[in-house]
Image (cartoon, helix red, strand yellow):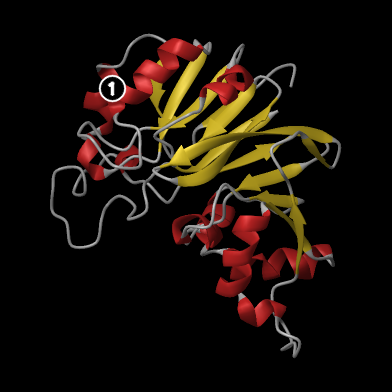
Amino acid sequence: MKVTVLGSGTSSGVPMIGCSCKVCRSPNPKDNRLRSSIHIETEAVSIVVDAGPDFRQQMLRERIVRLDAILLTHQHKDHTAGFDDIRAFNFFQRKPMDVYLTKEVEQAFVKEYHYVFDEKQYPGLPQMRLINFVNAPFKVSGLQVTPVQVYHYKLPVYGFRIGKFAYITDCNLIPEAEISKLKDLDVLIINALRKESHISHYTLDEALEVIKQLQPRQAYLTHISHQMGLHDEVNSSLPSGVALAHDGLQVMIEGY
């Protein structure tokens, strides 16, 4: 299974509009971060987790020409704003896009994309098949996905585990009941917004504490703000087995 980091940035992206800090002006491409998303690919299935405002750019950059499903972690715009661009996949694949989401997220999602779900359909609209999941394993084209419920301040958000890989974004609390789902991982990707405290995201130190508890073989940090600092400087300070994710990072997972 190949996991590609489509975007490793927070909701404003990096560089941030109007900012002239050293990170936003950095010539290092690893300091350029689109909104957080990943692509998961096996021989049998192609899945994206979250489709934010940079979805089109991410699909073109990685040359993704087939997409079977999109999994949604939650309803915030930096994770859902790109859905109008699934029309290209609708056209070439000649079918609606399967979108996996909770019932609570569906309520907000349908309101946001009301024009897609109105009774009077305009030609050329995105086509979606909404599939609800609950906090129990489900399958996408035969691939088993285990949801992991976490909290983004008070908002329930879902991460996902597939085999020896797990992805957790927009989180500052993993309930004790969910911790067991994240043991014995080869690779964990988890959010770390910045070094200073934040109301709804793990800080760098908090994410490192979670990683220390879970002990994955390799961990990557994502959903990163320009406030974190320069990629190379921060990366060189991290403990063994932990690294900053960057856009375009590819990780191979054996035995999924």
Question: In which quadrant is the N terminus drawn?
Answer: top right
Q: Pointer 1: residues within 10 angstroms few (<14), some, or many (20+)?
A: some
Query: Between 146 and 104, which is closer to the camera in this rendering?
Result: 104
Q: Is residue 50 left or right of residue 254?
A: left
Whether residue 169 is visible: no
Query: Between 93 and 147, which is closer to the camera in this rendering?
Result: 147
- Residue occupied by mark 1: 205
Query: Between 189 and 104, which is closer to the camera in this rendering?
Result: 104
Q: Position of residue 169 (x, y in %)?
A: 48, 39
Q: Amino acid at mark 1?
A: Asp
Question: In which quadrant is the C terminus drawn?
Answer: top right
Whether residue 63 is visible: yes
> Measuring 70% from the left and 45% from the top, which residue is drawn there?
47
Q: Quadrant of residue 211?
A: top left
- The local secondary structure at tag 1 comes to helix
Q: Position of residue 71 (x, y in %)?
A: 66, 48
